[in-house]
Image (spheres, rainbow, N blue to C red):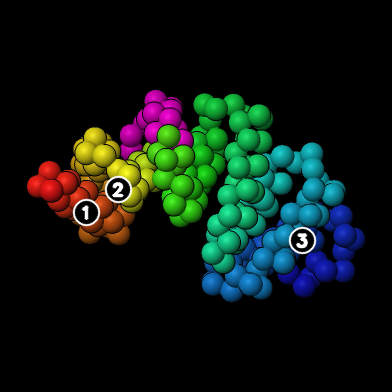
Amino acid sequence: WKTYLGRPEADRYRIQAIGILGAALDLIGRHEEALPLLEANLALYRRYWSHDERATRVAQTNVAMCLGNLGRHDEALVLKRVIYDRVVATLGVSHEDTLGSAASVAETLVKLKLYEEAKSFARDQLSAARKLLGPDHHITTLLSHHLTQSLLCNAGRTRDDLLEAETILLEVVKRRRRVFGPTHPDTLLSERDLSNARVKLATRMHA
């Protein structure tokens, strides 16, 4: 990446190099070092390449992910909402990128324990993902996961919430076993979630 530092500030390759370095540091767990680079990358895209909608959005997403990795979920959510609103404005609600952005918003809502908002938002997005992408798509299964987490973790959950979570997880487990195999980490995670849902449901029924 140092090869590009001598280039002009607005040079596309220089900006990309800063972003690649930041993303690599974030990937290996050096989040504190990654964040200023990713923020600089985003600022440069906004200043010189704001007409490149997709590149700017990727830069925003990288900053949001790094903030989340640092546990700064409130700040991450603000940025993720901005990204989602912009994607809706440019691509519409029925687009794979829009649904991917929605899954990211739902994930952070769950992490912030905003379960009621997460439940409503993820439920609507999951319905759209099933129609547009199909039930086996990774974004569909991600939204399924976030919805079931919002249903299971909410202290105000109802019996209907638990039944809904169990129904969704039964389908997710079946599909993940078929697509990924029985020993894949995603399959095992869904099986644990299903077991958790059944325990909570049994506890509620016998309370």
Is 117 located above or below residue 196 in the figure? Answer: above
Q: Which mark is residue 196?
A: 1
Q: Horizontal placement of 94 versus 195: left or right? A: right
- In percent of width and height, residue 2 lies at 77, 73
Q: Horizontal placement of 199 versus 141: left or right? A: left
Please tell me which residue is depicted at 39% across the width and 28% down the height of the picture. Answer: 127
Question: What's the magenta region?
Answer: 121-139
Amino acid under disc 3? Ala
Is 90 located above or below residue 204 in the figure? Answer: above
Report how far apart the C-alphas of labels 3 and 1 lie in the structure.
42 Å
- In percent of width and height, residue 153 lies at 33, 51
Q: Which mark is residue 40?
A: 3
Q: Which mark is residue 117?
A: none
Please tell me which residue is depicted at 39% across the width and 25% down the height of the picture. Answer: 131
Q: Quadrant of residue 182 in the image? A: bottom left
Q: Quadrant where the N terminus lies? A: bottom right
- In percent of width and height, residue 161 lies at 27, 38
